[in-house]
Image (cartoon, rainbow, N blue to C red):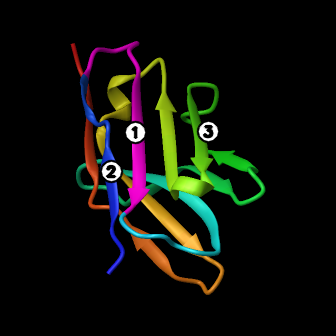
Amino acid sequence: QVQLVESGGGLVQPGGSLRLSCAASRRIFSIYTMNWYRQHPGKQRELVAAIADDNTTNYADSVKGRFTITRDNAKNTVYLQMNSLKPEDTAVYYCNFVTYEPINYWGQGTQVTVSS
């Protein structure tokens, strides 16, 4: 059973930065997209950023210019660099890998809290 393991969440002040990481516990082949979602309390999970296997990226309007998604295919790892964080970025962040089969893999979620 492949697991996605997230790290890097925590508490940060407004204007600060965090870097999230998500790595697969075993090798996954043919990953099409690696994605980051987030979920605010009482709301649906929303797509924050996505990166395809050709390194094409896509961002939610609310994070454009502040967040950067990158991937390391050799390590089956995706990163989310979050800068200029705002209180409204507070949420549980989930990573998601989608293969060409397609098979969906999800991480367990990591809490990001932006507060002074």
Mark closest to the chain's N terminus, 1 or 2: 2
Residue drawn where x is 34% and y is 15% of the image: 14
Viewer-side residue, 34 vs 85 = 34
Range drawn in magenta: 12-24
* Quarter where residue 3 is shown: bottom left
Q: Is residue 58 left or right of residue 49?
A: right
Crowding at mark 3 (Cα within 10 Å: few <14, some 14-19, many 20+): few
Q: Quadrant of the N terminus?
A: bottom left
Q: Amino acid at mark 3?
A: Asp
> Is label 2 in a helix, a strand or a loop?
strand
Tell me residue 70's x, y (percent): 60, 42
User: Which of label 3 and label 2 is nearer to you?
Assistant: 2
Q: Main secondary structure of the magenta part?
A: strand
Residue underneath mark 2: 6
Q: Quadrant of the C terminus?
A: top left
Residue underneath mark 1: 20
* Quarter where residue 98 is shown: bottom right
- Image: 26 above or below 61: below
* Quarter where residue 26 is shown: bottom left
Mark 1–mark 3 distance (CA, rounded to whole Å): 19 Å
Mark closest to the chain's N terminus, 1 or 3: 1
Viewer-side residue, 45 vs 36 = 36
Pointer 1 and pointer 2: residues touching (CB < 8 Å)?
Answer: yes
Residue underneath mark 3: 61
User: Which of label 1 and label 3 is nearer to you?
Assistant: 1
